[in-house]
Image (cartoon, helix red, strand yellow):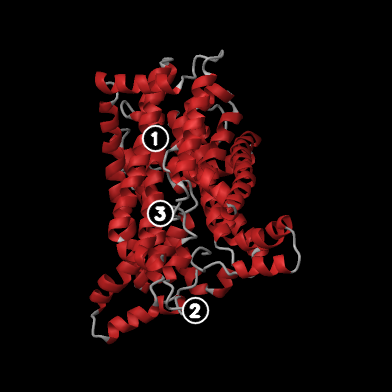
Amino acid sequence: MAPHTPQRSTRAQPSPARPAIAHSQSRHFGDVPLSGSRSIGLALLLAMLGLWQVAMRFEHPDFILSPSEIARHFVEALWSGELLPHVGASLARSLPGFVVGSLIGVVLGLLAGVARSLDQLLSPVVFLTYPVPKIVFLPIVMLWVGIGDVSKIAVIALACFYPCFINAYHGARGTPTIMVWSGLNMGARRSQTFRKVVVPSALPLVFAGLRVSLALSFILLFSTEMINARSGLGFLIRQSESSLRFDLMYVAIVAVAALGYAGDQLLLLARRRVLAWQDATSR
Amino acid sequence: MSGLLADPAGALRRAALLMVGGLVWETAARSGLSSPLIVPSLTRIGYQLWVLATQPDSLVEAWYSLARALAGFGLAAVVGVALGVLMGRSTLFAASLGPFFSGTYPIPKIALFPIFIYLFGIGSLSKVLLIFLECLYPIVITTQAGGRAVNRVLVWSAANMGASRARILRSVVVPATAPFIFAGFRIALPIAMIVVIITEMISSADGLGYLVMYSLASFKTDRMLAVVVVIALIGVALDRLVVYVRDRLVSWERLESYYVS
């Protein structure tokens, strides 16, 4: 990896009117706006559910439930207290992992994006180990810190670190040079330039990284819980599957889906709040 | 390789870092402070690596994992690029499929694995299909973004010179989208590796993920770490391969230097 100063890597800015970020951002998963007309999609979804419901009238294996049955079981499990403790256990693992991993990732990524010495120290390691599937570290971490929640949180944090570091790093390095220059020219100190120029211009990519990390944290949460846990939604799916309680299995799957969706929506909401200025300029 | 020649100082720094890491590990292993079960020495891991590499049995396990990951990824690549290009270029496809993909994107598909086992059996098929599903999303979404971003002047000029719609799609849109498609591939391939290892850890009697769990359960930590090294190497090698193919096919746009270390 060739060492670049931030200035050198951002020399080519064809049109200052178009933010540099808007170009590179689209290459990063998780930041692509997917609007389209909502009504057609909703109609398609309802049609699929309806078809599913109707298909259930014919002969089918035990392990397939109709949407209405799943909905009924979901409400029942919610009231009976079969579901909520597991939701709590899962969140108690995924949230600390996500917060710790992405916080360290964003901070180190931003700093590595502006400080050459840190860049040279960290980036080779990070970019080399990036394609390694982080789940393989679960057995190792389990060996070191035990089979409990700490090992799961550590693996989730590790997985969340990478997308955040990489996106924050690109974001900081992609800061238009001219903005840094104008900041310095107007007498901003280095710390001020970092806080008021580099960080805001990196934010769109940081959010893209957070979104990928969030999705990853859920994947790792449920797989670590499926591999070994005594509580949590992944455990619930495994347990109800092996005890042939398909109703509970579907309830847990729906809960997983709902959590993933809700987390993503929360993140998008925060993004719209924080990046209101960006949406206003790029559209 | 060219990276080594272009940046000898960086290569030296990386080698030094690797050696420091190895030294710390070896000291911890040999100091007697921790059990060899927790931190096995590098020589033992190296020996197990040698055993893994020379035993036909373990090569078969690696082949199982690789074949599953590549089958799921390949399927997702074909379907994902087709869907992504269609969604990027046609408002009808974008409007009908877009909400579906954006709505189900944040849902961890891994939760469907038990259902997949019931539907498609506990063998390779359920794993391959789960990998397909997890890889499909990043490929579709990045390809769609690329399809939207195709310079319309290029499309206009092709149409002006009498190209048919199919020809425009094949000769203009797909090549112009290629950088995005490869960006999607580079996201999807590590996901394929993650999912194949996870599914093999959860339920399998073969593959590298199984081998990790089996070695752990039989307290062969050195063997487990050797398998982890193999998985890591496969992950890095596959990523390099995608970058190589990308640089060959998309020769007109340089990949930003930070990814190619």
Tell me whether the residue at label 3 lies in contact with that at label 1, contact meaning CB atoms closer than 8 angstroms. Answer: no
Q: Which residue is mark 2?
A: A14
Q: Residue at x 44, y 66 (%)?
A: A22
Question: Tag 3's secondary structure?
Answer: helix
Q: Nearer the viewer, residue A72 or B63?
A: A72
Q: Which residue is mark 1?
A: A257
Question: Tag 1's secondary structure?
Answer: helix
Compared with A219, B156 (above or below) is: below
Spatial CA distance of label 3 from label 2 is: 30 Å
Q: Residue at x 40, y 22 (%)?
A: A70
Q: Which numbered disc, 3 or 2, marks the residue that appears first in the sequence?
A: 2
Q: Residue at x 46, y 75 (%)?
A: A9
The reply, left or right, for residue B67 in relation to residue B231 is: right
Q: Amino acid at mark 1?
A: Ala
Q: Quadrant of residue B152?
A: bottom right
Q: Which numbered disc, 3 or 1, marks the residue that appears first in the sequence?
A: 3
Compared with B87, B104 (above or below) is: above
